[in-house]
Amino acid sequence: MIKTGLYNWHKINSANIVSYAGYLLPVYYSSIVNEHNSVRKNAGLFDVSHMGEFFITGENAERFVQLVTINDVSKLSTGKAQYTAMCDHNGGIIDDVIVYKLNKGFMMVVNSANIKKDFEWLNSNAIGGVKLDNKSDEIGLISIQGPKSRLILQKLINTDISNLLFYHFIENIEIGGHSAMLSRTGYTGELGFEIYVSLESIELLWEKLISVGKLDGLIPAGLGCRDTLRLEMNYLLYGNDIDQKINPIEAGLEKFLRLNKSDFIGKDSIINAKKNYNNVLSAFLMIEKGIPRNGFQLLCKDQSIGHVTSGTMSPTLGKGIGLCLINKDFANIGDKLKIDIRGKLKSAMIVKPPFYKNGSLLL
């Protein structure tokens, strides 16, 4: 079990610490619903230090990132970030990642469960003129999310951050006396920021943020509401919604796919998949009362048509919601289906995501 730089703080303040991708993290401090609602209305503070950080430098760094990702990194200028994915030669998704264009080279942020696998994959496909560094164990990551996140964060920063746009970042900035990288990104659908900071500074900065944000409703938040928040926004979770058995076409990631750029790993397989695929990742809303969970089967007229990949009770909607991998013939908006919820068939409907449409994400 790996402890983040905030483990001791979590242990004192949460009785609900679990192993997540090998890291010891809190499910919640007060309750999942309370923390979820705080992020939607005010602000929440997350420890996301379990995420991995790779640094890619050298004269061929951009060429290499182009080779291993599906988006077009050449469109990035310094200070901008990009959501993308890495695929294997069959088009299967190795991981979904965020790439940051630094002053020198790139930083790639990967999912915690995939750190070892991803770094080995990158090394196995390395080209000349590229240096790869895995600094995941040296960097702490705090995420402050919610409509009041900028207001709270600004109290600890002398630089005006009101003009920092979505998926832009400041590489070197002082926050509460600590050197950090500040990114306008997140996993909640609300205005939010992610702070990359040294392990020596993370607990001090965490406590400063809680102190200055208390009057504005900021509270610490755990894994539980991180999942309900991301699902309301149709944000994918690796290992549930996507993995190496699914390609970007099936996963609905076509808007991040740039087939017109030069060759990248998996390109030919993805082009073939675009011409011939049977299943697609879709969003559904429960019509009847019930909470869908990963693995529950989908049926239409007693015919199996897919399965739930992620599901929960939405605190915002008060209804069961989820994502499913379903036969594309049954994935049209408005299509009805049945979900086998512990032996009982419950009605649901395919809907257009996201489930939550009133967030402060772009404010």
Image (cartoon, grey):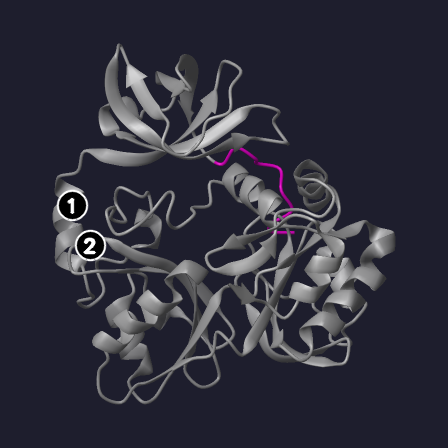
Residue occupying image coordinates x 30% and y 86%: 130
- The disc at residue 273 is 1
Q: Nearer the viewer, residue 2 or 240?
A: 2
* Residue 192 placement: quadrant: bottom right
- Element under disc 2: loop
> For mark 2, what is the residue?
91
Residue 215 lies left or right of residue 296; in this view the side is: right
Provide the residue span drawn in magenta: 354-363
Q: Is residue 160 visible?
A: no
| Residue 257 in magenta stretch | no
Q: Is residue 122 above or below residue 258?
A: below
- The residue most toward the top is 301
Q: Amino acid at mark 2?
A: Gly
Q: Is residue 209 above or below residue 256?
A: below
Residue 181: give x, y in percent of width and height.
Answer: 60, 75
Q: CA distance from mark 1 to mark 2?
A: 8 Å
